[in-house]
Amino acid sequence: MFYNSTRNSRVKVSSAEAITQGISAEGGLFVPEEIPKLTPDEIKAVGDMKYSDRAAFVFSKYLTDFSDAEIHYCTDNAYSTKNFETESIAEIAHLFDGTYMLELWHGPTCAFKDMALQILPYFLTTSAKKINLDKKIVILVATSGDTGKAALEGFRDVEGTSILVFYPEDGVSPMQKRQMKTQEGGNVGVCAIKGNFDDCQNGVKAIFTDNDVKSLLDEKGMMFSSANSINWGRLVPQIVYYISAYAELVKDGEISLGDKINIVVPTGNFGNILAAYYAKHMGVPVNKLICASNINNVLTDFINTGIYDRNRQFYATVSPSMDILISSNLERLLYIMTNKNDTIIKEWFGKLASEGRYEVSDDIKSKLSDEFWAGFCDDEQTKAVIHEIYGKYSYTCDTHTAVAVKVYNDYKAVSGDDTKTIIASTASPYKFSAAVLEALEGGKSDVDEYSKVDRISELSKMPVPSALADLKNKPERFSDVIDKSEQKAYVLKILGI
Ligand SMILES: *Cc1c(COP(=O)(O)O)cnc(C)c1O
């Protein structure tokens, strides 16, 4: 398997090269040359494996330059009960008839980002060895809250790497901020940006592709890589849990092999739902992929009209990990849907950069509406859904997952479709305790963050994850706040260049 760049189809690299580079030199994203196919029997067999072997099986189709031993080294280290609270790694909760919550947040930072970021450091260091790269790898991360912490945990004290995370100063939850500011490890850095997630992400992308910065790093024996979902090594682990969940439902007799399911994903950067798209095209029988957004509904409009327009008000919501107006992974989807038309991709994404807007062709519009259904909801609706689900099923979900549930309810009402459905549950409710508690009890509470957490625990009857409880006593190590124009200088300063 080789990987092309979305902005130059002639680029052809191995997975080890794609993972170490993160992003292609001309700014494109790496995409596998073709989507490997699984037979129904292979999918069924996945159900009999433990999670780390499920992952190894899927990776063997994509990381063909890795030996079996290398793949298992990565999967065995990442997906064990050392790092995850549940044996199954990706737990399925049966919510109501035919609706399943795929709980992806039992890892060390309580968000689904752990599913990929627990393994990415192993992928990256193994890849670097394979291609005889003897440079120190510098991970730059832009985060809307969850990626930053998950990447910091994944990379802390990993030899041969260092990591620097940028987050929007006022764009993350108090718990997310505390998680990052108290991060331990000798190779980590954290800095707030006066701006939103898109500012952080644009800054990081610009630094990655800045040739002057690159050669400065080169002279010092360093190179950049990315832990954002622009890195293929972030995306491929996310394909696993959709295949795994389908196989598990077959094994449990909830569905029969071959039955179609819907998959609902609360979406920001379009990474998680793109992984579901890959799972579908590998052979998981999917009826609709349902893209759920908060009030930053640029993707809802795009899927419904074919016009991507980021020229709109940006809102800070109670689901901050989805407060994004530039969804990077859409570039991969459109590259696939245009049959690798790098010229048109360059045109569209050039327009996105210069005018903030592009419109896809009619052919792509119809492909989008065949595969996807899109909707959004606001903060009031998000909280109302948390309240409703708790009342009906004694189940406490976080704000992002609630957006998915609300959009799924809307989909069902409009379509009348009663296909069994997997909802990606992307974070622990404890990470967004203010909004969750307000939703559960009605009315704002002015107690401190940890009292809110304790109260949610009483109501939900779920123990507080130790990783969050422990934060209370940890000292804050990082307090820098900078202007977005200072990002590049800051990176050079931290790296001692
Ligand atoms: C990152 C994140 C999302 C959005 O996922 P994308 O892959 O960026 O679309 C949704 N929910 C939570 C809790 C997240 O951390």
Image: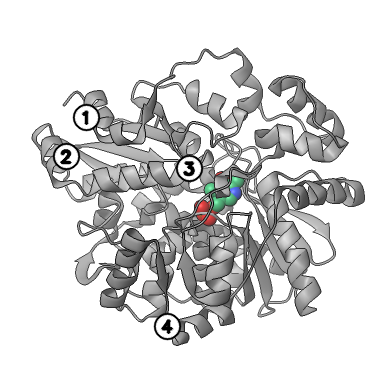
* Sequence-first disc among 3 and 4: 3
Tag shown at residue 213:
2
Query: Of callouts 1 and 2, which one flags the residue occurring earlier in the amino acid sequence?
Result: 2
Q: Which residue reaches farthest left?
A: 219
Which element carries disc 4, helix, strand or loop? loop
Q: Which residue is most to the right?
A: 392
Q: Residue at x 69, y 45 (%)?
A: 399
Inter-mark Cα distance, 4 to 1: 42 Å
Residue contact at pointers 1 and 3, CB within 8 angstroms: no
Q: Is 21 situated left or right of 450 in this image?
A: left
Going from N to C along the chain, the mark reached first, 2 or 4, is 2
Amino acid carrying label 2: it is Val
Q: Quick check: marks 4 and 1 in contact, CB under 8 Å?
A: no
Q: Which residue is mark 3?
A: 78
Q: Amino acid at mark 4?
A: Ser
Q: Earlier in the sequence, mark 3 or mark 2?
A: 3
Q: How far apart in space, not on screen, are marks 1 and 3 (Cα)?
A: 31 Å
- Label 3: few (<14), some (14–19) or many (≥20) C-alpha neighbours in 10 Å: many
Callout 3 touching callout 2 (CB < 8 Å): no
Evaluate whether residue 1 shows in this view.
no
- Residue on which disc 1 sits: 492
- Dividing the picture into quarters, in which one does residue 156 lie? top left
In three-dimensional space, the C-alpha distance between marks 2 and 4, rounded to whole angstroms, equals 37 Å
